[in-house]
Image (cartoon, coloured by chain):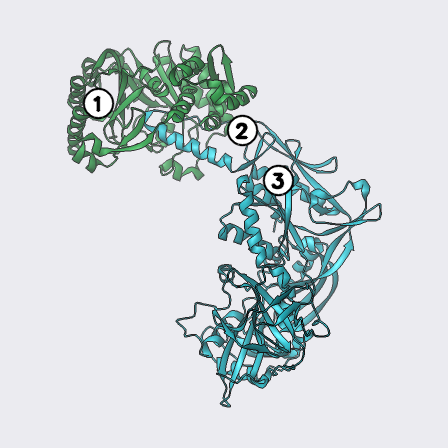
Amino acid sequence: MTNKEAEIYIHIPFCIRKCAYCDFLSFASDEGTRKRYVSALTHEIAAACTELRGKRIRSVFIGGGTPSVLETGQLASILEMLFRCADIDQKAEITLECNPGTTDREMLSALRSMGISRLSIGAQSFQDPLLKTIGRIHGSAEIRKCYDDARRAGFENISLDMIFALPGQSLKDWKEDLETAALLGPEHLSAYSLILEEGTPLFENRAFLDFPDEEEYRDMFYAAGEILDRFGLHRYEISNYARPGKECIHNVGYWTGVEYLGLGLGAASLMKNRRYRNTSSMEEYFRNSESPEKIRTVEEELDLHDRMSEFLILGLRMTEGISAEEFTSRFGRDLTEEYGRPMEKYLSLGLIKKENDRIFLSEEGIFVSNTIFADLL
Amino acid sequence: MANTDQSHIRNFCIIAHIDHGKSTLADRIIEMTGLLTQREMSEQVLDNMELERERGITIKAQAVRTVYKAENGEEYILNLIDTPGHVDFNYEVSRSLAACDGAILVVDAAQGIEAQTLANVYLALDHDLEVFPVINKIDLPSADPERVVNEIEDVIGLEAADAPQISAKRGINIEAVLEDIVQKIPAPSGDASAPLSALIFDSVYDSYKGVIISCRIMDGTVRKGTNIRMMATGAVEEVVEVGYFGPGRMIPCEELSAGMVGYITASIKNVSDTQVGDTVTDNDRPCAAPLPGYKKVTPMVYCGIFPADGSKYQDLRDALEKLQLNDASLFYENETSVALGFGFRCGFLGLLHLEIIEERLEREYNLDLITTAPSVVYKVYKTDGTCIDLTNPTNLPDPSEIDYMEEPVVDAEIMVTTEFVGPIMQLCEERRGQYLGMEYIEKTRAVLKYVLPLNEIIYDFFDALKSRSRGYASFDYELKGYQRSPLVKLDILVNREEVDALSFIVYEGSAYERGRKMCEKLKAEIPRQLFEIPIQAAIGSKIIARETVKALRKDVLAKCYGGDISRKKKLLEKQKEGKKRMRQIGNVEIPQKAFMAVLKLDDE
């Protein structure tokens, strides 16, 4: 991957209310905190973007939390600073995450005109009781409204986040959700399975909740593939589906080793073969955001071995998998020599497939991908 | 310094059921006789192995010499010989008793007589020891000393009306015990000018002094320069030092003569040369015959011990070698397992001994071990007329070559309150016990006598006994001999491959049940893998039980965005680490603890 390209992630850690399954860095906030945050963030942008000198930014992703809880003007000042400090490609994909119930048409129009090109809507489900179980603030009506507003505002690239394996969710519920979502006609859809994270309310109450069993889970995954395919959304990664050409550039960057700079509270970066993360303490962030070095902790220094295994375990997440040739050109090593043994094992078990130069997970392989990845570390 | 003529020496031990307060009383005696202040005493001076203190039991016999000024104004040397407190070490107990002239019987004022109380008293009386009772823990709210006095008189037949009623823990009435020691325990006899005969009741290895022999001089005198000979092993060495045991340290002296208890060092390199029970004599002027009662201890229980990490094999060998320096009853030889690689087949006196060694290897030598199911020693009579001692199930000859097999059995005494007689009898029946009889000790308590196969009691009998009697049953046994039994080898196949380390010998009538439980247990222990794994139990080529570990159908299919790549990798790393700790059998990964699963098959 050429080092001339990079991506930017911006974290907005605010929400109206935290959802029952969420373990991200996000929380409810007051107006004053948001104001201080935006100011601290613009300072960080100004200081940190000097590290991107000479790099063309191919995508920006403003995630959270719920970035749309910020005022339009606040988002505008963040973007303005970004455009001033970084070399953002004319055709860059600029995504903003938003949640139904926090947007209106006027706001979305403003965002579109500011240069946001892609909207990722946290729909999760169209079944109101399920939305309630997982602690969302919206119902299905708000999703539709948010979606319609976005279209009217001129967004031509919309993604919906959907979630399955929820407590009390049947296969039928999920199929209905998929169809409802697909009928809206989004360019992109993410279908994540619920992960019970320690410390979340859902985790604490797990004993009283009825989760789909393993076979239902598999059926749900299959249903996503089938139904979405029917609507022209093809799977391009374990949990992601898109119309051809509408795959999320930003996320594909994560899976193919593109450098990225994370800005904002708790944001993670991959720069110069080093993975680091910003502080998650708001106090510390406010104090030192203009000296980015001070708020960072290095999580990993990637040596050749790390980079090779990341190439595999991230690359194999994608349906098109990895290219043996690219492995060689990137690392100057032969894939078979380095990983021949586990590769052979999974090929013989039918969990990995090989077509010409490309190696990718079979559908069965996707189900046990963690086991395979652990072997490739 | 106290008088050292024989009339002012008392050699004694304390006997008790476990937890009745033996070690605490020993501490009080040492403290009261002024050799250590309370502050200097770490709790329970005699139990000085870390493990002993944790488990609250004595593993090795030890001795301590103190001086007591009696009410008559004279000073007496008190040699207290501590005895191991577990049935595994019965032989060591008997040798310690043989070194004494009397014994203090400690009985818990609340619990009264228990199985080990009886067993120990009989053992002491067998050695012609003068036994006097002491009633301990009178400070407990549930103490009922009068009942216990009656029990001691009725059941054991010892005079107990005047028995000191004490609290060793609180130091109440310890003087009475000390006076009884002087008055009731006879002074040693023996001729200091006769040829030397000394009884070894313990020996330990010290890296500076070599083997330190703990002994009781029966006749004669030993001093620096004496050429001593161990009569059973034949080892001859010149004495470097003699002395006695102060609390926590050794105090050298000129000589040890008849009636005294002390130690001898003689640059001996190996404890196997100085076996407990052997007689030390003067090589230049030997006694006519060794002291009675010596026997070579032989392991009763064997198991395979393997390093979890194959590269630690040499470390394990070194550790076993070091432990053996101090423990002549520990046996080991090389063993190679298809499943577990290079390791050792080890022999032990019993399951406790096994556990202790295992813990010491793990704790003191920092080794991560895989232990296979313990096995007793079977006698296999072959059709060609020969007989082999089978210590490893893997070595069982082909059934066509076997005429018949014998297994070791024990005489067991179980003491239990009458309400639990039913459940305990049922347990003994389940364990193939032959009922010998029942005696009532008092209205509410009885002793059940059974002959039980050793292989039925080595795993979990004690736990089962406790759980079925709500903790009230106590248990003692001794090896009786061998009896013919229909026995078979049960093999375990994982993914159709036999796992040698999981084979075991079992009574034919229990084979189906054990095979079924073993398969269930392994099913629970072996994590699902990418393909289906059959687990089968087989006798010869006949499959008698089967379970299946279903193929792994899914992992969690999470999203993976930029912010959690590091975290995700850590989780995968953990998964990989977990795999490393497993044993690869064919294509299947088996966790280490699965090899111990066979130990816990009782549902109780």
In terms of secondary structure, where does tag 2 sit? Answer: loop
- Name the kind of residue labelled 2 in the image: Leu
Q: Quadrant of the N terminus of chain A?
A: top left
One can see residue A367 in this view:
yes
The residue drawn where x is 54% and y is 83% is B4
Are the residues at dot 1 and dot 3 in contact (C-beta closer than 8 Å)?
Answer: no
Up the image or down, B463 lies above or below A95; here it is: below
Mark 3 Cα-neighbour bin, 10 Å: few <14, some 14–19, many ≥20: many
Circle 2 sits on which residue? B552
The residue drawn where x is 63% and y is 69% is B228
- Name the kind of residue labelled 3 in the image: Glu
Q: Of the numbered discs in the image, which one, if any, rests on residue A51?
A: 1
Q: Is residue A209 left or right of residue B187?
A: left
Chain B drawn in what color?
A: cyan
- Name the kind of residue labelled 1 in the image: Glu
Q: In 3D space, how far apart are the residues under numbered discs 1 and 2 (Cα atoms)? A: 45 Å
Mark 2 Cα-neighbour bin, 10 Å: few <14, some 14–19, many ≥20: some
